[in-house]
Image (spheres, rainbow, N blue to C red):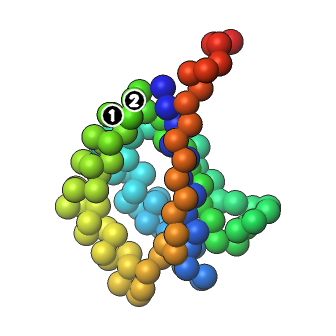
Amino acid sequence: MIYEIREYTTVPGRMPALVTRFNDHTLGLFAKHAMEVVFLSLTELGANSTNELVYVLRFDSYAEMAEKWAAFQADPEWRDARGASEADGPIVASINRRVLSPAAFAAR
């Protein structure tokens, strides 16, 4: 099992557009592609507390992660939703991504 943490920093003032895109499109497309969201939040305190969205996905393997992301990115519904949501300009300024593995620790 691996976990992918993604931190999206938005263009200033564009967080509402990103939240709308997640609620109206991205989360449904994640479900369509069997991408399990285990955590989703806005950063409320600390660095980037005004323009950061953080989420965590769970995958069985690196191969599964790569396969599901490829299918998601190629989905015409995603491409249309992304394009429409960026009609007024870019939403995401940067993405920070980490993949974590709890394999080194005994199950409790």
Residue carrying label 2: 61
Residue 5 shows in the view:
yes
**SS assignment at label 1:** helix
Question: Callout 1, which amino acid?
Answer: Glu
- Residue 48's mark? none
Left or right, 32 with respect to 41, comes to left
Badge 2 amino acid: Ser
Seen in the picture, residue 54 relative to 87 is either above or below; the reply is above
What is the total number of numbered labels drawn onto the structure image? Answer: 2
Q: Residues within 10 Å of mark 2 (few under 14, many from 20)?
A: few
Q: Quadrant of the C terminus?
A: top right
Pick the residue in front: 64 or 29. 64
Whether residue 16 is visible: no
Classify residue 34 as left or right of residue 8: left
User: In this orientation, which residue lies closer to the viewer: 92 or 94?
Assistant: 94
Residue 90 is situated, as x and y percent measured from the top left of the image, at 43, 80
Residue 29 placed where, x, y %? 33, 51
Residue at figure coordinates x 30%, y 75% from the top left:
83
Q: Quadrant of residue 51?
A: bottom right
Residue visible at 27% across and 49% down in the picture: 70
| 44, 70: nearer the viewer | 70
* Residue 8, image quadrant: bottom right
The answer to whether residue 106 is above or below residue 66 is: above
Q: Which residue is mark 1?
A: 64
Vertical placement of residue 74 versus 61, above or below: below
Cβ–Cβ below 8 Å for labels 1 and 2?
A: yes
Residue at point 26%, 66% (across, down): 79
Q: Find residue 42 and report its horizontal and vertical position in percent.
A: 65, 59
Secondary structure state at the residue bearing disc 2: loop
Q: Residue furthest bottom?
A: 88
